[in-house]
Image: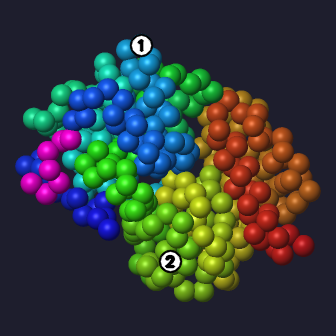
Amino acid sequence: MRPLLDAAARDEDEHIARNGPLPWQHTPGALIAALAEAGLAGRGGANFPTWRKLARTSVADRPVVIANAAEGEPASHKDKVLLQRCPHLVLDGLQLAAEAVGARRVYLYGAVVPQRKSDRYPITCVEAPDTFTAGESSAVMAAVNGRKPLPTNDRRDDMLVQNVETLARIAQIARYGPRWFRRHDTFLATVSGAVQRPGVYEVERGVAVQRLLDLAGGVGTKAVLIGGYHGTWLRPHETIADPGAGVAIALPNNESGLRKTAEIVGYLASQSTRRCGPCRFGLPALAEALSARRWNQVRQLVGLVDGRGACHHPDGTARLVRSALAVFEEESR
């Protein structure tokens, strides 16, 4: 296996010496076909097939490509680590995505990088606020258009937003091919909580939760929140089918899973834009009901907020709560 973080380089010249020149595809549709064959899914949390997003944008008028480096998830640091160690691999992927869709404008949202001599598409860097929802794709689109980075239910086919790890994987597939990627399909995970060695680890997709715990020195773990604050709780013996945003938070045996979930939902309620009923009223009520252990009300509120918001923030919160009620069922008796 050739780990992603092994592509680290101090500058562009070292990057090229270690990883080879930027592999321009030249043939229209070649990269999109390779991504489809590779089966690459987005690494920002949605797990959507990457090739479909590129294909949709490639037929739009005056496409825009955005590298999303905003990492508002409090427990996530994998994108920051990737940009610190392998920025040129991310930039390669950004350039290749721009070529594949015929981009008119290219942005890097949430980070600043120097222009490179090998780039054909100039990159405009845009600042991102340190909020949970600022990295949501519609909020990213708003930011690069000069508006406040607030999520909405608007979706624009002419704007391609890709997480920076996804772009790095695109660069790998362009260099080594879809077959290589299918044999070495890994993901970056930020492991924290009840572990001795918190940090960013690279593991195979479909790995057991216990594998992450072993790498990070987890002892006496009740469950692990996989995918971040919009993720799901899993027991150590279970496998990770969908890593989401690449976050793993280990919960010790002596801590209440439902109490921890209530704390997270309280944070998520505070991070909402309060522009729709589910965020303005539903999430605070859900956090309060969880804290008060009113389980019937919790279940009712989950059904009320799910699928009814202006964006997917309430949906992710509902998914988290449903997972907690299932995994920590004994705590609600």
Residue 286, image x, y percentages? 78, 50
Q: Nearer the viewer, residue 69 or 277?
A: 69
Q: Secondary structure at mark 2?
A: helix
Q: Is residue 330 left or right of residue 105?
A: right
Residue 95, image x, y percentages? 26, 34
Neighbour class for label 1 at 10 Å: few (<14), some, many (≥20)?
few
Q: Amino acid at mark 2?
A: Arg
Residue 21 drawn in magenta: yes
For the point 69% across and 62% down, the residue is 261
Q: Which mark is residue 15?
A: none
Q: Which mark is residue 211?
A: 2
Q: Amino acid at mark 1?
A: Asp
Q: Which residues are magenta?
A: 17-23
Residue 232's quadrant in the figure? bottom right
Q: Nearer the viewer, residue 184 or 81?
A: 184
* Residue that protrudes farthest toward the top in the picture: 61
Answer with mark 2 or mark 1, whichever residue precedes in sequence: 1
Q: Nearer the viewer, residue 234 or 241?
A: 241
Task: Tell me whether the residue at label 2 lies in contact with that at label 1, contact meaning CB atoms closer than 8 angstroms.
Answer: no
For the point 21% across and 59% down, the residue is 8
Residue 305, image x, y percentages? 78, 41
- The quadrant of the rendering that contains the C terminus is bottom right
Neighbour class for label 2 at 10 Å: few (<14), some, many (≥20)?
some
